[in-house]
Image (spheres, rainbow, N blue to C red):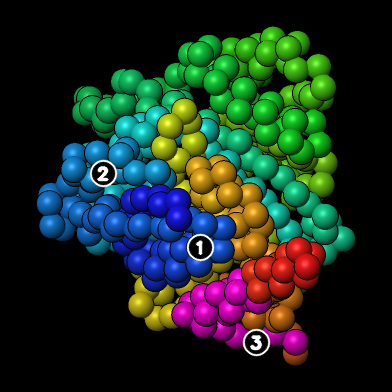
Amino acid sequence: MNKKRIAVLPGDGIGPEVTTIAVDVLKEACSHYGFEIESVEYLFGGCSYDKHGEPVTDETLEACKSSDAVLLGAVGGRKWDNLDKEKRPESGLLKLRKYLGVYANFRPIKIYKALLNASSLKPEIIEGTDILIVRELTGGIYFGEPRKTTQTDHGAIAIDTMEYSENEIFRIAEKAFLAAEQRSNRICSVDKSNILDCSRLWRQTVTKMSEEWKSVELSHMLVDNCAMQLVRNPKQFDVILTGNLFGDILSDEAAMLTGSIGMLPSASIGDGIGLYEPVHGSAPDIAGQDKANPLAAIASAAMLCRHSLKLEKAAQSIENAIEKVLDAGYRTSDIYTGAKDEVLSGTTETGKLILENLNKIETRVHSYKTKAAT
């Protein structure tokens, strides 16, 4: 059996609850395709600060880099909000992304038919929406220098710097073009080129690159217009390519098309180890209450199978199990509307249902293969 080592960073708040379930699903799905998953947990985020005085230790960083992939839960919470910025859990996340070199963040926005009424938008607006947001992850205003707050005679002044090099734009755009070739051959590159020099370089670089990708249709859109178009007509988009700050905001907005940010997985990849995490935060207000939606974490495990383990069938089986559970009417509180065909389900029960449906799917597949062989 092929053995793979996964570094698991449960993190804070609801992170440990949803990550435990995602790991169970990952192991089960992979076992059907000859892969044994060895998962090793490490402290990360606020809980790491509480024990080590740092949101991520050098030992944890090295352990992640020596693994086959990293599965992350969530970080942060009010408990650590007043720490110095380099000690905050979020700083640990930025450091991990930089250390692993995961410069491309994939956030799929998929609308499940069973959840059409869970969105705040009309079903006819969102039905059929299938978007992949490709966000640059290790550059832009989150990493630019200088970044500081200084005191002056006229009060405090804070400075953050948005900075992009041509090479940073090239490598994230290449990921988007490759992804578009596997989808509908359409990219919408989002920027603020009417105002920002960074965005003008972004648009120029992506436009120049498109000359080498004749099969992919490229369009450009200003970020404020894109924010409006996502709620006006989301079906017009296939692949959205954008920078770090814009991608952070637009993907959270797009998450609500699905009914809840608790439904949105992500994959952060570069040229080495992949990092997989649900987009939702640590939600400390519901931690430990069996209310968290584990589906984004589970879907992140499916993306881990697809991108890091190259197990497309395992990824599809996990995604099919999610769809089966939703079709059966089970809902965690964030996507529960009170409709008569819905059943309110907790975190643990939802995880068990996914595993049950996963095994049913695999049993049918293996049964079909056995019949075909005879």
Q: Mark 1 = which residue?
A: 31
Q: Residue furthest bottom?
A: 340
Mark sitting on residue 226: none
Q: Is residue 91 above or below residue 110?
A: above
State left or right for residue 265 relative to residue 329. left
Query: What residue is shown at x 26% (from left), y 44% (from top)?
Result: 63
Q: Is residue 196 visible?
A: no
Give the prevailing secondary structure in the magenta stretch: helix
Q: Residue furthest front?
A: 374
Residue type, label 3 = Val
Near-viewer residue (209 or 229): 209
Near-viewer residue (108 or 124): 108
Q: Earlier in the sequence, mark 1 or mark 2?
A: 1
Q: Mark 2 = which residue?
A: 63
Q: Is residue 357 magenta?
A: yes
Q: Quadrant of the N terminus?
A: bottom left
> What's drawn in magenta, residue-wise?
341-360
- Mark 3–mark 2 CB contact (< 8 Å): no
Eye-nearest disc, 1 or 2 = 1
Q: Is residue 313 above or below residue 31?
A: above
State left or right for residue 148 relative to residue 117. left
Query: What residue is shown at x 52% (from left), y 79% (from top)?
Result: 352
Q: CA distance from mark 3 to mark 1?
A: 30 Å
Q: Mark 3 = which residue?
A: 343
Q: Is residue 168 magenta?
A: no
Give the SS element for disc 1: helix
Specify few, some or many for label 1: CA neighbours under 10 Å numbering under 14, 14-19, or 20 or more: some
Q: Quadrant of the C terminus?
A: bottom right
- The x and y percentages for residue 195 are 60, 19
Q: Quadrant of residue 38?
A: bottom left
Query: What residue is shown at x 56% (from left), y 58% (from top)?
Result: 33
